């Protein structure tokens, strides 16, 4: 019984993760891209100032 509940829980978590990925993958990727671009610009600016 315990194993069945555990398996059902993992299946539910998997379904939730797939749903969240499908719904939020594009907005999250855009936010990650913005963050990385900001960081790269800061690093480039600091490197230019050092030279």
Image (cartoon, grey):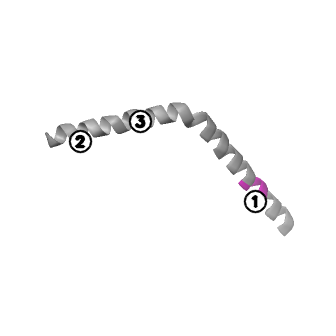
Q: Residue at x 43, y 37 (%)?
A: 17
Q: Position of residue 43 (x, y in %)?
A: 75, 59
Q: Residue at x 68, y 50 (%)?
A: 35
Tell me the distance, in whole angstroms, between the alpha carbons under discs 1 and 3: 37 Å
Dominant SS in magenta: helix
Q: Which mark is residue 16?
A: 3
Q: Please tell me which residue lies in front, 34 or 43.
A: 34
Q: Verify whether residue 8 appears in magenta.
A: no
Q: Which mark is residue 43?
A: 1
- The residue carrying mark 2 is 6
Q: Which mark is residue 13?
A: none
Q: Is residue 20 visible?
A: yes
User: Quick one: label 1 or label 3, which is nearer the N terminus?
Assistant: 3
- Mark 2 residue crowding within 10 angstroms, few (<14) / some (14–19) / many (20+): few
Q: Is residue 11 left or right of residue 47?
A: left
Q: Is residue 34 left or right of residue 17?
A: right
């Amino acid at each position: 019984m315990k194993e069945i509940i555990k398996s059902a829980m993992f299946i539910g978590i998997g379904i939730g993760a797939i749903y969240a990925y499908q719904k939020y993958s594009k907005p999250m990727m855009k936010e990650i891209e913005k963050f990385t671009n900001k960081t790269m610009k800061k690093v480039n600016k600091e490197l230019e100032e050092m030279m």
